[in-house]
Image: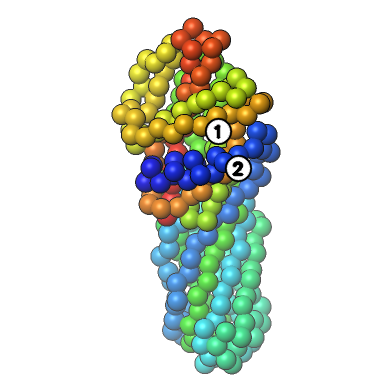
Amino acid sequence: MIRTVLVALALAAGTTRAAVPTPVASSAYKIVVPHTSLDGGTATLPLAGPPPGVEVLGVTWLLDYKSPHSGTPASDLVLELSLNGLPPMVVTGADLGWPATAGAFTGSFTSTDVTGVVQSEKVYTTADLSIDSIDGGVVGKLSGLVQLELAAICQKSAGDGGPGHVQLSICGDLLYTGGHAGLVVDGAPPFAPMLFLASVTAGPSPFKGGTLVPKPRLLTMVAHVGASGSLLIDMPGGGAHVIFFLQVAVADPSQANGVALSNALIVELFP
């Protein structure tokens, strides 16, 4: 998995930019609603939710109706999403006009008063989605997704490296399939060569006058910064749920041992 990520970074390095990007304001996270049958207008689904400790700014429901209804066309639809650590988020869609034929209607609902923080425990959260019809006893089939708008997300620090002033950051979407984040290296000498160092474990140890965090180093990748001493790479997410440690070593003749070390990051990937 780490090899896949760094190969993707190596390919992206050919189109990197020297400028440091503007911090990301928010990030999207999608919860897929599988093909579901409504029996009498009610269904409760356990779904995979976002990781712990993220702030939810808003929620949008997108549902596609896949089969004819057998209830009252004017039935209201109630969508209730429960995430660990947050009160239930409820949206009611008035008079959706349940379709007489499959695929005739897509409903979208947005709630903006759901700000809060998902549980802080280090476990992968789950989401419960409840779909109810107020009246009409609707029986039908639907599928769709719940899209969460999350606060800006940056990968967490695993400690400073030093010496030197090189900084490493990864900010953007959660790194799930379809998500992207900006990996930025800044504070290096112009056009300096550097190594990305990665491992699934941390073993801080002395290195060239600083501290190297990834150990054992399972993979390295060579790159160069630009004239401004910075590098921006578009980092894709996806694959398995895995956590690894990432750090950068940069050639720096101003340092006693000729090397500057960035801070280390804890990088988390999601399916």
Q: Is mark 2 on a helix, strand or loop?
A: helix
The quadrant in which residue 91 appears is: bottom right
Please tell me the numbered disc located at residue 48. none
Look at 64% across and 68% down and name the residue there: 109
Front-lying residue, 50 or 172: 172
**Marks 2,1: beta carbons within 8 A:** no
Quadrant location of residue 100? bottom right
Q: Which amino acid does label 2 sit on?
A: Thr
How packed is label 1: few (under 14 Cα within 10 Å), some, or many (20 or more)?
Answer: many
Residue 118 appears in the figure: no
Toward the viewer: 115 or 208? 208
Q: Position of residue 79 (x, y in %)?
A: 55, 70
x 55%, y 88%: residue: 102
Colour scheme of the rendered structure: rainbow
Which residue corresponds to mark 2? 15
Above or below, 106 against 31 in this view is: below
Q: Residue at the spot x=40%, y=46% of the render?
A: 4
Mark toward the viewer: 2 or 1:
2
Q: What secondary structure is marked by label 1? A: strand
Name the side, left or right, on which 115 lies relative to 40. right
Depicted 91 relative to depicted 224: above or below: below
The amino acid marked with disc number 1 is: Ser
The number of numbered badges drawn on the structure is 2
What residue would you read off at disc 1? 169
- Pick the residue in front: 116 or 254: 254
Q: In this view, does 73 lie above or below 251?
A: below
210 versus 134 height, above or below: above
